[in-house]
Amino acid sequence: MSSEEHFRKLERMYASAPINRFFRPALAISRGRAEVRIEIRPELFHAANAAHGAVYFKAADDAAYFAVNSLVEDVFVLTTSLDLHLLRPIAEGTLVARGTVVHEARTSFLAEAVLEDGEGRQVGRATATFARGPTRLSPGIGYA
C-alpha cells in the first residue's frame, strides 16, 4: 500500500468516528503531519460565548495523533499524554490545528500541535506523546 492510500484510509477512519458527528471536523494528512479544521459554532461555546477548552483539546489531540499515525501503518496509536496551552479565545470562524511529529522512537512518538484562528493568530499549543497500541488498523474500525 502506498503512503497516500494509508493517509486516505486514516482520513476515512477519522470521518467515521461517532464523536465527529458533533464536532464536524475536517482532516488532511501527509507524512508526519496532519491538519484538523473545526468550524466554531455556538454549540461549542462555554458560558462566556467562546469555544470550550474541549474543542481546543480535540483539535490538538487529533492533529498530533494523525501526524503520528501517518508514520504507523499497522496499528492504531494511543495518546499517552497531552500538555495543552490555551492562549486566546476563539468565538467565530475556523479553528485550525496543525500537528507535526517531532521525535520518533521504536515504540513511542512525540508530536506538537499549533492551533490558530482563521486569521492565523495562535490560539493554542500542545505537546503530546503517543505509543503503538494493540488495535490493528482494519476495516472493522473504519480503516478502509
Image (spheres, rainbow, N blue to C red):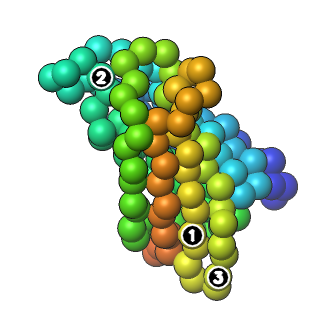
Q: Amino acid at mark 1?
A: Leu
Cα gap from disc 2 to disc 3, whole angstroms = 38 Å
What residue do we see at 65% from left, 62% from top?
Answer: 101
Is 15 or 83 nearer to us in this picture?
Answer: 83
Instruction: Bin the neighbour count of mark 1 within 10 Å (Cα to Cα): few under 14, some 14-19, many 20 and up.
Output: many
- Residue farthest to the bottom? 106
Label 3 sits on residue? 105
- Judged by depth in the image, the label closer to the viewer, 1 or 2, is 2
Which quarter of the picture shows residue 44? top left
**Labels 1 and 2: the sequence-earlier one:** 2
Write down the quadrant of residue 37 in the picture. top right
Mark 2 / mark 3, whichever is N-terminal: 2
Q: Residues within 10 Å of mark 3 (few under 14, many from 20)?
A: few
Which residue is labeled 1 in the image? 110
Mark 3: amino acid: Ala
| Residue 121 position in % (x across, y down) | 56, 30
Q: Residue furthest left?
A: 47
For the point 64% across and 82% down, the residue is: 105
Q: Nearer the viewer, mark 2 or mark 3?
A: 2
**Residue 143 shows up from this direction:** no
Residue 126 visible somewhere in the drawing: yes
Q: In this figure, what is the number of numbered marks?
A: 3
